[in-house]
Every structure is written in structure tokens, then in C-alpha cells.
Amino acid sequence: MAKIHILANRKGGVGKSLISINMGAVCADVAGVRPDGRPSVAVASADPQGTSLWRAARLVEQPFDVLDISGDLENIALLKKLPYAHIFVDTPGWAEITPEEYEAGEDPLGDDKYGQLLKALLVQADDVIVPILTEPDSFEPTWQTIEWVIKPRQIPFQVVINNWPPAEGMAYVEGTRAFCEGHGWPVARTVIRRYRVHTNATKVVTQYHNNRVELQAREDFYRFALEHGLRGSGAGQGEVAEVSA
């Protein structure tokens, strides 16, 4: 039975596609292939913009299978039955509602096609990875994603600080981490740094060159995969579940 890892944040541009593609690559590298020679990992796109599909299509070599589920609401319930060890799901952002609307009972995911798709996916989720930027305008959408959507469903989750430019200094990381920890959220010790090589859509991190910069860029994703508990085809999610309880 496949483990379903959802990348979610109401805000767009926080790196859900980048993380889903590269976590899929790292996990596929560790897990290897199935007995039939097919990949044991898949990356699924529920995003109508299809950023992860676009990136995957440009890869010289795909280490995982790629699934377009953005228009397949009726089959979401079968996702865990697919013959993969892990499936990483890239999801779209969604429209903001006010606290007053939420308190009045309005669904924060909405009732349109993609709101229904997100709700169906969250039913299947083993855990949720929530990227956050070291930028204040990503804080409130992240809070809404976790407090209004993930926690009420009691899904294990982990926040990861993404796309941090090291030249800005650690103060931005420390401030973002303090914001997360102040709300009691499990936040990864690994910080995914901003590297120009990540914008090269023809490679994933497992295909980077063995030079200093690309090795550092690769290291962030291997460290985060290890921290998230992704050890291969038999991996459980104990670490995330424990810190999320």
C-alpha cells in the first residue's frame, strides 16, 4: 500500500512543486525499483497549473513515475492501492476566506472542483509537508493551512523552511522557526536553501554534478528526506507522527 505524502500550503510559490519532485527523486534513489523494473515512487500533480508535470516532462531522465490527477476526482480513493511505496502529491493553492467566514462554518477549501480534490486527497494522506518561506507574507497562509485544514483532520504534518537565501543571514530562518514553534508546529531542522541549480528543470537533485555547490544543494533534500522518515520501500512515518501528536 502506497504512502501518500501531500505537499500543501494555501499560498502559491512556496515550493510545493520543487519539493515534491526532488523528494520523489531522493526517495526513488533510496527505494530502488520494483521487481518488474518500474519505479517504486510516483509524483502526482493535483495542480491545474501543472508545474510539477512541466518540470517532470523536461527531465532528461525521470527516476519516478508521473501521474496527472488534477482531473481525476473519482479515482483519488484508489491512490493508496497503486503499486508504489511512496507517492508525493503536488497540490494547488486556494482562495482565502476571512476568520469570520471560517467561524461561520464556511469550508476553507471551498466547494469548487479543486476544493473537492484537496479534500479527497487529505482523506488519503499519510502525512502533509507544509513548505514555508522566510517571508512574512507566507506566515498567515501557512497558519490557515495548518490550523483550519490539516489539524482539524488530525493528519501528521511537518513544516519545512524552503527557498532561504543564505546571504540574508540566519535571522530570517530563526524568526520563521520561532513563528512555527510558537504555534506548536513540528518544523524540520533542515532548511532548504535557495540555489540557482534548482531552477534547472532538466535535472533533479539526484542527478546533480559532484561539485561543491550542487552537492550542497543536493544535501538539503537528502537531509530532509531522512528527517521526514523516508527510508525506502518499507518506511513508516513514525517520526512525523510523534512530533505531530
Image (spheres, grey):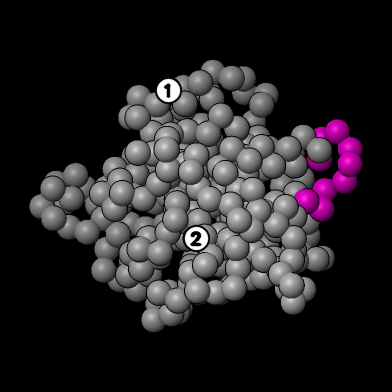
Whether residue 143 is visible, yes or no, is yes
Q: In which quarter of the image is the C terminus?
A: top left
Residue sitting nearer the eye, 95 or 73: 73
Q: Say if 221 sits above or below 45 in the image.
A: above
54 left or right of 175 in image: right
Residue 123 x/y as whole percent:
35, 63
Q: How far apart are marks 1 and 2 (CA)?
A: 28 Å
Residue sitting nearer the eye, 237 or 201: 237
Amino acid, disc 1? Ala
For the point 70% across and 57% down, the residue is 31
Q: In which quarter of the image is residue 71?
A: bottom left
Amino acid, disc 2? Ile
Residue 16 x/y as whole percent:
54, 52
Residue under pointer 2: 4
Whether residue 179 is visible, yes or no, is no
Residues marked 1 and 2 touching at CB (< 8 Å):
no
Near mark 1 (Cα within 10 A), the count class, few <14, some 14-19 or many ≥20, is some
Residue 214 x/y as whole percent:
81, 40
Is label 2 in a helix, a strand or a loop?
strand
62 left or right of 129 in image: right
For the point 21% across and 47% down, the residue is 98
Residue under pointer 1: 178
Is label 1 in a helix, a strand or a loop?
helix
Q: Quadrant of residue 29?
A: bottom right
**Residue 125 lies in the magenta-colored region:** no
Residue bounds of the magenta highlight: 206-214
5 left or right of 120 in image: right
